[in-house]
Amino acid sequence: MSSTEEIRKIAQETCGEGREGKYTFLYLRENIQWVHYARERMMQVAEDTGAVLCYSDHFDPRPAPVIDYQIGALRDDFDFGSVLMIRTDALKQAVSEMDTDYRFAGLYDLRLRLSRIGELVHINEFLYYDEETDLRQSGEKLFDYVNPKNREVQIEMEQCVTRHLEAIGALIRQEDYKPLPAADDSYPVTASVIIPCKNRVRTIKDAIESALRQEVRAPYSYNVIVVDDNSTDGTVEEIEKLKVKSEGDPKNQQIFRGSPVERLIYIAQDKTWHAIGGNWNAALHHPMCGKYAIQLDSDDTYFDETTVQKFIDAFESGNYAMVVGSYQITDFAGNILPPGKIDHAEWTAENGMNNALRINGLGAPRGFYVPLLRTMNFPTTKYGEDYAVGLRICREYPIGRIWDVVYNCRRWEDNSDANCDVETMNRNNLYKDRIRTWELMARIIDN
């Protein structure tokens, strides 16, 4: 059912003269087994709500709950389960309006068009059994949309969502971008590497040393700000050892307004709730934060000693509010894993700000223009905080790109997204969809 041609065939079969039922059930997998009276229950909910599409929780064979649809649920891989029940008159209307022939985005186009006709209703009851065929862990599925093998599919999905955004009045255009606020001369360094961490005793040393090895040309300068959020596993002790070591190294000392300052700065958070977003905010508002803030996760490393300089060059060469690099996937030992290089080629200067509402992230590592980001801040959450800021920025300001690999994204068993259970995945996806919903509403209001 991936092509427009197949969707039209379905409509012809179900909407033909003498064959038209009020509802059409689309089975996305074979061997669906229904709970008793489940189809009747779906139709009852549709009658009560006027929904154009209903979908439900199910078993696969374990309980497989799904999440509520909202206007920001624009991911083309949104999980409806294996059965879509569509009101036939809405199916007929949506298909009659299809004016583009897609090879891969036919079903995506259909459900976006249905969402413009009426409500898509989630029935949070377990109504059928099917069998999950993709048994990979969540960490393996994470990079499907940036795999170069899927590029042709991604181009069609982008075309489809762009037309949808235009239809609902949410499209952003480059010519509407604003100028960046000016920076004063109060910044102690050009750039700061920001490393938020919590219980990363096995990896924090690699991350910090990777940051301290950076080579930056004069007149530029940089420092490293590590924000620890109450670690209990020995992470703090590792940070303190590195801080003592860096204080004795002349290379890690610099002069600001006539006084020596340290390159490595350690912030210990209080006991209140911070999460990754709150840790970023602590670094951004620290008096030693530079004009540009560059991400380094506590279990990753920079590709080589030129990463910070490449970010500075990108910021200085363009009027960017944010710069996103490219990275490679490695194991804990540094061996490259498939799909290897991730450059987020789906981002273009012309349409990246719109396509960003469809994809699940903007890439890594990320650098930010601090004078602007201090007016926005990160949401105080441990998931999706960077995506929320990226969406907010690209609504009004340009984002630059570095296409060279500048970062090693290390996959290991303690990655936060390595092997999430269904409840965690649903919670994460629901939050990102909510971020998209808020952003979509803001763009519609702005337009």
Image (tube, rainbow, N blue to C red):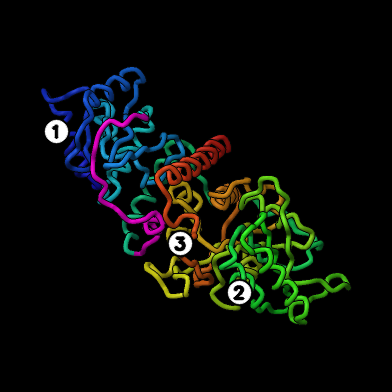
Q: CA distance from mark 3 to mark 1?
A: 48 Å
Element carrying mark 3: loop
| Figure quadrant of the C terminus | top right
Residue 175 shows in this picture: no
Which one is earlier in the sequence, the residue at label 3 or at label 2? 2
Q: Amino acid at mark 1?
A: Glu
Element carrying mark 2: helix
In the image as oriented, which residue stretches furthest toward the right?
Answer: 258
Whether the residues at callouts 1 and 2 have beta carbons within 8 Å, the answer is: no
**In the image, residue 74 above or below residue 231:** above
Q: Amino acid at mark 3?
A: Glu
Q: Which residue is denoted by mark 2 in the rendering?
A: 210
Give the magenta-colored segment's residue range: 124-148
Q: Which residue is denoted by mark 1 in the rendering?
A: 13
The residue at the point 62 percent across, 50 percent down is: 275
x%, y% of residue 284?
Answer: 71, 56
Which of 203/43 is in front?
203
Q: Which residue is denoted by mark 3 in the rendering?
A: 413
Element carrying mark 1: helix
Q: Amino acid at mark 2?
A: Ser
Q: Magenta stretch: residue 261 in it?
A: no
